[in-house]
Image (spheres, coloured by chain):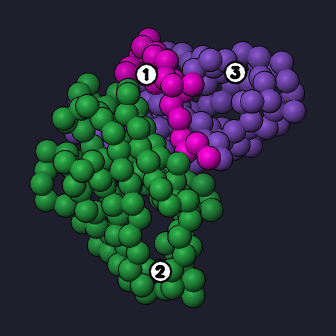
Chain colours: A green, B purple
Amino acid sequence: AQTVTQSQPEMSVQEAETVTLSCTYDTSENNYYLFWYKQPPSRQMILVIRQEAYKQQNATENRFSVNFQKAAKSFSLKISDSQLGDTAMYFCAFMKHEGGGADGLTFGKGTHLIIQP
Amino acid sequence: DAEITQSPRHKITETGRQVTLACHQTWNHNNMFWYRQDLGHGLRLIHYSYGVQDTNKGEVSDGYSVSRSNTEDLPLTLESAASSQTSVYFCASSDPLVGEDTQYFGPGTRLTVL
């Protein structure tokens, strides 16, 4: 079984600053995906970024990037030039690649990120 | 646009009643999932389905059942609701067979069991 750990229950930064959310995971799998989902107060789960474990290059989506360290089983999310709309819960999630991930996602407990004006 | 919807968005029920939460997706995805979200636990997998007539138990399946009679729908049934099942429920879908590994989520249903 996989476990995902987010060690920062809450973080607060000023608008326009850069912030890094940490995530570590434990698995014996070699092929897998990692995701960051954002959950704003609306409750909707929104995909932020995803990383395939076989890819060495870190994924980037506009202001969002990850630092994927496979050997260390670490998957941190960096948000550059943070904006008020980035205020949300952020969840790190793991999915096995075998079987197309049809056995679901394993989530961390989340980090509540607050962007201060 | 293709989407995934859940109904109702909010539900209050009493202990012991049977409750069914609906999930409908128009992406024609084969894989569908139900999760529950509780404070301090993130999201946890309840049941999932690879396709029509297929259902599988997840991490927290006790007290829940699902059935898949078509591609678009995966209703979640609480046979006899308990206070411990007060939670927010999310449905999701994906289809790796068409290159869609990422799971996309519905808006959630907040269920309160009194």
Q: Secondary structure at mark 1?
A: strand
Q: CA distance from mark 1 to mark 2?
A: 38 Å
**2 and 3 marks on the same chain:** no
Q: Residue at (62%, 31%) from the top-left corner?
A: B22
Q: Secondary structure at mark 2?
A: loop
**Neighbour tally class for label 1: few under 14, some 14-19, many 20 plus, Cα within 10 Å:** many
Residue B96 vs residue B42, the one in the foreground: B42
Q: How many marks?
A: 3
- The x, y position of residue B33, in whole percent, is 47, 31
Q: Earlier in the sequence, mark 1 or mark 3?
A: 1
Label placed on residue A17? none
- The x, y position of residue A117, in whole percent, is 57, 88
Residue stretch rendered in magenta on the structure:
B40-60
Q: Please give the residue where the numbered disc 3 appears in the rendered image.
A: B78
**Neighbour tally class for label 2: few under 14, some 14-19, many 20 plus, Cα within 10 Å:** some
Is residue B29 found left or right of B89 in the rendered image? left
Q: Please give the residue where the numbered disc 2 appears in the rendered image.
A: A83
Query: Between tags 1 and 2, which lies in front?
Result: 2
Is residue A2 found left or right of B16 in the rendered image? left
Q: Please give the residue where the numbered disc 1 appears in the rendered image.
A: B49
Amino acid type indicated by mark 1: Ser
- The x, y position of residue B3, in whole percent, is 46, 45
Amino acid type indicated by mark 2: Gln
Please, which chain is the residue tagged with disc 2 on?
A: A
Amino acid type indicated by mark 3: Leu
**Neighbour tally class for label 3: few under 14, some 14-19, many 20 plus, Cα within 10 Å:** some
Q: Residue at (33%, 39%) from the top-left corner?
A: A26
Please, which chain is the residue tagged with disc 3 on?
A: B
In the image, residue B44 lies in the stretch drawn in magenta: yes
Q: Quadrant of residue A87?
A: bottom right
Q: CA distance from mark 2 to mark 3?
A: 40 Å
Q: Are marks 2 and 3 in contact (CB under 8 Å)?
A: no
